Amino acid sequence: MGSNTHILWFFVFAGLEERVDEYESGTDSDYTQYWVDWFLSRKGNEYFCEVDEEYIMDRFNLTGLNTEVQYYSQALDMITDNLDDNLDDEMREIVEKSARHLYGLIHARFIITAHGLTKMLEKFKKCDFGRCPRVLCHNHPLLPVALSDVPYTKSVKLYCCRCEDIYNPKSSRHASIDGAYYGCSFPHMLFQVYPQLVPPKSTERYVPRIFGFKLHDVAKQHRHQDRIREDSHARIMAGIEGLQQQQQQQRLAIAAAAGSQKKGGEENQQNSNSKSPSMTTESGAMADVN
C-alpha cells in the first residue's frame, strides 16, 4: 500500500514539474494572449470575440489605425504583452485606455473576415447577444450592429434579422460600448456568408381588438380622413395668418412712405418761406434805388 502511494505521488509531482516546464518554456504566442484574456473576461465585454494573434501581428490589418489611436505603439505593445514595465501608473492608465480602443477597432475589422465570422456565429448560436424583445419574433437571437463606423458617435445596437429592426441592449455596460467596434456591415455580412441562417420574414402583426372584435377598416379610413382634414385646415389657417401679416406689413410700408413724403413737403414749404423775405427785401431795395 505504501509503495503504491509513493508511486502515485511520484506521477503527480512529475506532472506538476512538466506543467512548470511548459510554463517556463512558453513561446511568445502564449504570452500575447494574457491581455486579451483579461479584456474578454471583464464584465460588459461579452459581445467581443477573441481576435486571432496572427491577425493582430500582421501590420497590414492595422493600416491607418495609428492615426486614430493615441499612443498607438504602446497600446499595441500592451495588447501583445510587450509593454515596458517601467511606465508609471498614470501613463499606464492612459495606455490602457488606448489599448481598449485599439482592440475595439481591430475587432471591427476582424469580425468581417472568414475566421471572425465563424467566431461570431458561435456566439450568435449561443445567444450571447441576447434575444429580440419583440413578442412576435419569438425570442430570435440578436447581433450587434453600429449606426456609424466613426468612433465616439453612436453606441452599439442589436439587430434582429427576423423583424429587421434594431434595439438598445438591456445592460447599461453593453449600451455604453462604441458601435464602431462592430461596424455597420457585420450582421449583413454574416447573413451573406451564411444565408441558411436567415429566418422567414415575420409576417405576424399585432391586431388591435375591442372586446375581441377587430377594428373595422372604415374606422381607420375615417381617422385618416379626419387627420387629412385637420392638416388641411391647419395649412389654410397658416396661409390666412401669413396673408394677414403680409397685408399688415404692406400697410405699414405705405404709411411709412406717405409719412416720409409729407415730411419732405413740409421741409420744402419751410425752405420756400425762408426765401420769401429776402426776395421782398431785395425788391424793396431795388424800389428805393429807382
Image: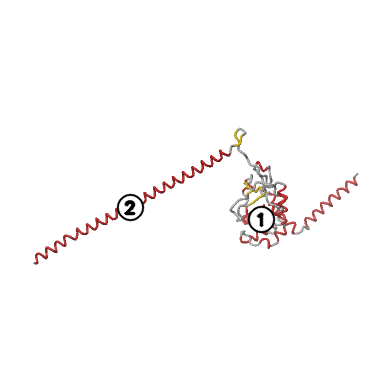
Q: In which quadrant will I find the N terminus?
A: top right
Quadrant of res 221: top right
Query: In the structure shown, which secondary structural element does the residue marked by tag 2 occupy?
Result: helix
Q: Which mark is residue 254?
A: 2
Instruction: Give the CA distance from mark 2 to mark 1.
Output: 67 Å
Q: Residue at x 48, y 45 (%)?
A: 232
Residue that mark 1 sits on: 108
Q: Nearer the viewer, residue 26 or 182?
A: 182
Query: In the structure shown, which secondary structural element does the residue marked by tag 1 occupy?
Result: helix
Q: Viewed as shown, does residue 103 lie left or right of 282?
A: right
Quadrant of res 93: bottom right
Q: Residue at x 68, y 56 (%)?
A: 112
Say few, some or many: other residues with alpha carbon within 10 Å of mark 1 (under 14 / 14 to 19 / 20 or more).
Answer: many
Question: Can you name the residue that lies furthest to the bottom here?
Answer: 290
Q: Amino acid at mark 2?
A: Ile
Residue 14 in percent (x, y) is at: 84, 52
- Circles 2 and 1, Cβ within 8 Å, touching? The answer is no
Residue 3 in percent (x, y) is at: 90, 47
Say few, some or many: other residues with alpha carbon within 10 Å of mark 2 (under 14 / 14 to 19 / 20 or more).
Answer: few
Q: Residue at x 61, y 34 (%)?
A: 213
| Number of disc labels | 2
Give the mark nearest the N terminus, 2 or 1: 1
Question: Can you name the residue that lies furthest to the top here?
Answer: 211
Q: Amino acid at mark 1?
A: Ala
Q: Which mark is residue 217?
A: none
Residue 6 in percent (x, y) is at: 88, 48
Colouring method of the image? secondary structure
Q: In which quadrant will I find the C terminus?
A: bottom left
- Pair 2/1: label in front: 2
Q: Residue at x 64, y 51 (%)?
A: 145
Residue 105 in percent (x, y) is at: 65, 56
Q: Nearer the viewer, residue 10 or 268?
A: 268
